[in-house]
Image (tube, grey):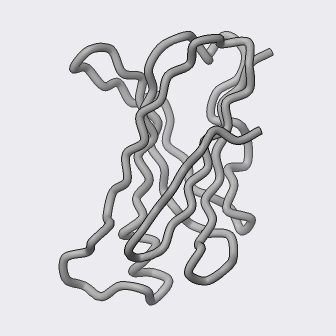
Amino acid sequence: MGRLSTHVLDTARGKPAAGVRIALYRVSGNSHRKIAEVTTNADGRTDAPLLTGDDLQQGQYELVFYAGDYLRASGQAGEGELFLDQIPIRFGVPDASQHYHVPLLISPFAYSTYRGS
């Protein structure tokens, strides 16, 4: 059974990023349809997978991480313009029977992602 999961690590502080709001969209052409919104827990993870079973379908998805809110709340950014605010990660699911883990590593001035396990 396939599933989609994520977590967020704060590389500047060397710990999980708790309290990061994440929106998940299904993408079809120029259309985005929000299908989930969650917040990371104390371990920087969501309490459950974002999608499981038949809810995970082949196609394009986009996760939007509201990093700016987290960076401000954690004291790493002021009230002005941020270098990183909302971080979108668009990815494809070619085989819905697999596990897709899309982590985000953030700091006030950089981010990275990869397909995890």
Q: Is residue 82 above or below residue 96?
A: below
Q: Residue at x 41, y 46 (%)?
A: 64
Residue 76 occupies quadrant: bottom left
Q: Residue at x 61, y 49 (%)?
A: 103
Where residue 73 sits: x, y (%)? 45, 81
Residue 16 occupies quadrant: bottom right
Residue 62 occupies quadrant: top left
Q: Nearer the viewer, residue 109 or 46?
A: 109
Q: Is residue 69 above or below residue 61?
A: below
Where residue 114 sits: x, y (%)? 59, 44
Q: Is residue 35 above or below residue 79?
A: above
Q: Residue at x 47, y 30 (%)?
A: 91
Image quadrant occupied by the C terminus? top right
Image quadrant occupied by the N terminus? top right
Q: Nearer the viewer, residue 3 or 93?
A: 93
Q: Nearer the viewer, residue 37 or 115?
A: 115
Q: Residue at x 48, y 74 (%)?
A: 107
Where residue 95 sits: x, y (%)? 64, 11
